[in-house]
Amino acid sequence: MPWVTRGLREGIVTTPYPRHPDGYGRSFKGHVVCEEKATGTEVAAAAAACPTGAIEVGAGGARLDRGRCVLCGRCCEVAPGSFHFQPGFETAALARPALVVPGREPDDGEVARAREQLRRRVKALRRSVYLRHVDAGSDGSEEWELAALMGPIYDINRLGIFFTASPRHADVLLVTGVGTSGMLVPLRLTYDAMPSPKVVIAVGTDAVSGGLTGGTYASGKGVAAAVPVDVFVPGSPPSPFGILYGILLAVGLVGQAPRGGEARPAGAEAMEGKGVAP
């Protein structure tokens, strides 16, 4: 039984997140930052080099849509003075416009209303949460990250979060993929079969905006046209930590990270009422 001695030798490998911060966030290139009022020929060249058209250059400077960014890093290479990677995995947002940077900062009242609406819908989920995953035309990369959540490093079961095969048992719908024409009806049927309250999370750039292959005759520009999305998790693919943060954000167990995207520790109070041991 070599696994016994190996387990004793390596000790606990499961992350303490979200009760305590995880050092992983400081080293993961989770998103690209666009400097305020970025202009010039380099910025225009970066916009032309972006494979998904995530960079828009206007009179007031450039704006980057993280919901369309696939983290290829071309803009950082072409215009390093205006674009650069920033560490952190807490990049999920409760509203699609929040993924556009630099952009209008939502006022406190707007944020409070969005949080309150979501809180009312998920207050009944202060118990075990069940996830139903639907692949709506993914390239398979997000599925690898979802599978990792079940391993010993992330172990989402410790948080009372489980995957289920039946939408009638699900609280949260995880959707990956661009939303192909052949999957829009099955996706909607899955959503309609879920009991209320229910939450939808678009996982990955493809599900958020269509990514590299969206907008064709057979693929859509994300899944929001088929189901109402509550949480957007950018990345191509997002890391397991990024997906986990999106799930916890969806069910109200952590708060929205700052606009800059810096990973902020989620304290033990985030899991109050969940009944989960550290």
Image (cartoon, rainbow, N blue to C red):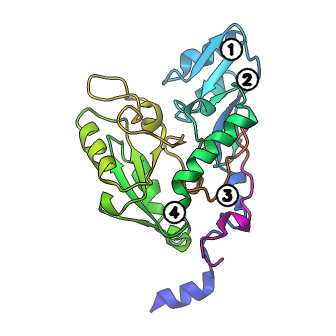
Instruction: Point out the residue furthest to the front here.
Output: 120
| Label located before the other in sequence (1 or 4) | 1
Q: Are marks 2 and 1 in contact (CB under 8 Å)?
A: yes
Disc 3 marks a residue whose amino acid type is: Tyr
| Magenta stretch, residue numbers | 263-278
- Residue occupying image coordinates x 58% and y 45%: 117
Element type at marker 3? Answer: helix
| Label located before the other in sequence (3 or 4) | 3
Element type at marker 4? Answer: helix
Q: Are marks 1 and 4 in contact (CB under 8 Å)?
A: no
Q: Which mark is residue 82?
A: 2
Q: Is 145 placed above or below 159 here?
A: above
Q: Is 148 placed above or below 231 here?
A: below
Q: Are marks 1 and 3 in contact (CB under 8 Å)?
A: no
Please tell me whether residue 228 belongs to the stretch shown in magenta: no
Q: Quadrant of the N terminus?
A: bottom left
* Mark 3 Cα shell of 10 Å, populated few (<14), some (14-19), many (≥20): few
From the image, state whether disc 2 or disc 1 is nearer to you: 2
From the image, state whether disc 3 or disc 4 is nearer to you: 4
Disc 4 marks a residue whose amino acid type is: Leu
Q: Is 267 placed above or below 183 here?
A: below
In the displayed structure, does residue 155 sit left or right of residue 31?
Answer: left
Residue designated by label 3: 24
Element type at marker 2? Answer: loop
Q: Which mark is residue 125?
A: 4
Give the percent coordinates (x, y) of residue 51: 49, 24
